[in-house]
Structures are given as structure tokens and as C-alpha cells.
Amino acid sequence: MPYQGYSDYFDKRLIISVATTGGHQGKEANPNLPEQPEEIARDVAECEEAGASIVHIHARDDDGDGTKDVARFQEIRDAIDAHCDDIIVNFTTGGGGIWSREERIAPILETDPRPEMATVDLGPVNFGQTRTAVNTREQNEEYAEAMLDAGVKPEMELFNPGHIPEMEHLVDLDLLEPPYWCTTIFGMQNGMPAHPRNVFAFADNLPTESEWQVLALGRHQLPLTTTAIAAGGHVRVGMEDNIYYRKGELAKSNAQLVERTARIAAELERPVATPAETRDILGL
């Protein structure tokens, strides 16, 4: 069990990740969602000021459509470096069923500097009626090994508890270095149902030496991330996962969601981690 009690609760700093853009809904869903490099970077700077220590990056082309173009990821990275102080950059390798596995990992390996972190989707997930993002064990091994060689920390994205054995497989192969960074995901189409009690069921089965955060979609973001804070975990918020601040009210910015999370953490007496402290927690 990665978390074994409240003995360190008041000292354990909370990592806030923010996923600003995503690869699905765009400005048609919320006009405040950032899509272009300068827009993303300014948004990320506000999130860093509000308490986020990790930013999860997807890229969009000039028309707002998702892209794996290395040059566009480089442009976003350069803009973030220009606007932000020290936030940790985390690139996605998502996009199964749209891009090839080589296209999905290219931005992680070919940008300069490389991101400090990148995601590994540990198993298949359905989107709509016809698309499945296929994430095979072979692909996961390939991505984890490439990131290990490149000095990039993998973020294990687990859409349901059935993906835990896939993570354990990578641990057994020595392709992951502790502490392991895990994102437990709630509310996806064929993922873990979004209920606070499932936060504990998921987290308690992660490998020893895991640090974990909760990602919950839509209206589930607020209650489940709050549960994670109280349980000693970490959180991911942002308009990739949830475009609303409250029912019927679109979020004004990603920073607004980060600010609320930091306020809740303060009320629950969980100090918020700086980027430097996050690097120390995760062994970056």
C-alpha cells in the first residue's frame, strides 16, 4: 500500500498538476481554453503562480486541432520557458487510435530540452462508439525504456485497476525508477467509476513506493480531488478534464481551478508543493 496512515499527513506536501488544453474539446466548449503556444504559456504562468508545480501538455495546430508535430511541442516548450519560473513540463504520449506509436513519443525524445516527465497510458480506453486507444504491453515497454534512457520520468496513467498489473510488469523489468508517479483516472467511458470510495480502492492497490494523483472528469473533478487531498494523495485539475467551475458556469481559466484546489488544500492543512519540492518528492 503506497499510503499507510496519517502519521505524515500535515507534513506531506500536495502536488498540483494542471492539464490546460487536452486533445478533445476546444474553444467551442469553453472559449477560455488555451490552444496556441503563447496562449498556453501565459495560462501556465498563471497556474504556476496559483500553486501548480506540473503542467501536462497537449499541442494544437493553428486550427485548434490536436497534433503530434514536434515543432509545435517545441514552440510550446519555448514559450513556457519564457513565461514561467520553474514549472515541471510533462508531455503527453496519448492519442492512440489517431497517431502511430512513433508519432506519439517523438515530441518527448526530439524536443530540446526534453520534458522532465511524460505519460504512459497503461491500457486500452474507449472513446465514443468507434474509437479505442490501444496501448499494448509492448508499446508500454518501449515507451518506458525510451524514457529511462532519455532521463524522462514516466507518469503512469491508469484508467482502471486492471492496468495496475501492467505497471507492475514494468516495475519487474526495472523500467521504472521509484518513487513511481501514478495518475488514477475516474469517469472515463470504460474506466474506474467516479465515486470517492473508489479512490481508496484504487490507490491501496498501487505498487509500494508509489506517489499518486487523482484525475476525475467533469463534475467529478472537485469531489474526487478533494478526497485525494484528504487521503494523502495528489491532484490533477484543468480544462482538459473539466471545462466548468461549477454547474452551469464555465471556468474562466485553468488558474481559477488551481486556485480553488490550493484553497481547499489550505483548509485541509496540506501545504502545496513548489516545483522544487515536487522534484524532491518524485526523485526528478
Image (spheres, rainbow, N blue to C red):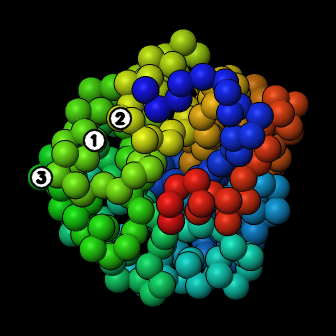
* Outermost residue, top side: 197
Which amino acid lies under the numbered mark 2 shown in the image of this protein?
Answer: Pro
Mark linked to residue 167 = 1
- Apparent side of residue 254 relative to residue 106 in the rendered image (left or right): right
Q: Is residue 257 above or below residue 104?
A: above
Category of crowding for the residue at label 2, using alpha-carbon neighbours closer than 10 angstroms: few (below 14), some (14–19), many (at least 20)? some
Category of crowding for the residue at label 3, using alpha-carbon neighbours closer than 10 angstroms: few (below 14), some (14–19), many (at least 20)? few
Which amino acid lies under the numbered mark 3 shown in the image of this protein?
Answer: Glu
Residue 152: x and y in percent read 40, 69
To which residue does mark 2 refer? 207
Mark linked to residue 138 = 3
- Apparent side of residue 98 relative to residue 108 in the rendered image (left or right): left
The total of numbered circles placed on residues is: 3
Whichever of labels 3 and 1 marks the residue nearer the N terminus, that label is: 3
Q: Depth check: give the residue in front, 127 or 16.
A: 16
The secondary element bearing badge 1 is classed as: helix
Which amino acid lies under the numbered mark 1 shown in the image of this protein?
Answer: Met
Category of crowding for the residue at label 1, using alpha-carbon neighbours closer than 10 angstroms: few (below 14), some (14–19), many (at least 20)? many
The secondary element bearing badge 3 is classed as: helix
Q: Nearer the viewer, mark 3 or mark 2?
A: 2
Residue 99: x and y in percent read 26, 61
Answer yes or no: do the residues labelled 2 and 1 have beta carbons within 8 Å?
yes
